[in-house]
Image (cartoon, helix red, strand yellow):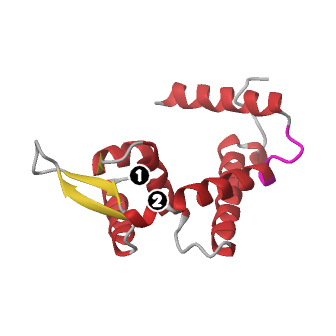
Amino acid sequence: MPNNHFKRGELYSVINAMAATAIARRLQKNFRNAGLDITIEQWSILYHLWKEDSLSQQELCERTYRDKPSITRLIDNLEKLKLVKRISHKQDRRKNLVCLAEGAKHLQQITIDLANQTMDEALVGVTKDEIEIVKRVLQRVYDNLK
């Protein structure tokens, strides 16, 4: 039987999407229970800015796998929450850089802790070896299709 012949319920992308959706919903619930008024989509922007501040909107598109209109909307909402600010690029005035605002700094540790807690909840009963296998397989699938 070929590797790509499987039953309807075993479609890997569906299983992967179900797991990702369940994790995202639980993380959002954990944020809400902690009194945090940000979405996981907004958090993904902050996460990349915590790793490297002052990124262009295009860089954020690439790092989060989102399109420009989605990034623009997320940044607009994060600006309203006073978590990020846009500044003009010094060498290219057509570009804006997105920078962390002071209000975002206190969110970093609590949201990272909640993300780790969520992953701990999701991975109950899953061994380290199983996690490594899944990571390798998904990376290979991604590499094959990019």
Q: Amino acid at mark 2?
A: Lys
Which of 35/58 is in front? 35
**Dominant secondary structure of the magenta stretch?**
loop
Which corner quadrant holds the N terminus? top right
Residue drawn where x is 66% and y is 61% of the image = 27
Nearer the observer: mark 2 or 1; the answer is 2
Report which quarter residue 11 is drawn in. Answer: top right
The answer to whether residue 71 is left or right of residue 24 is left
Give the x, y percent position of residue 41: 50, 61
Which of 129/138 is in front? 129
The answer to whether residue 60 is left or right of residue 4 is left
The disc label shown at residue 66, or none: 1
Give the magenta-colored segment's residue range.
Answer: 121-126
Give the x, y percent position of residue 133: 75, 27
Let me know if residue 131 appears in the view.
yes
Give the x, y percent position of residue 104: 45, 62
Magenta stretch: residue 123 in it?
Answer: yes
The disc label shown at residue 105, or none: 2
Q: Amino acid at mark 1?
A: Arg
Residue drawn where x is 68% and y is 46% of the image = 16
Residue drawn where x is 64% and y is 59% of the image = 24
Figure label count: 2
Give the x, y percent position of residue 99: 32, 55
The answer to whether residue 35 is left or right of residue 93 is right
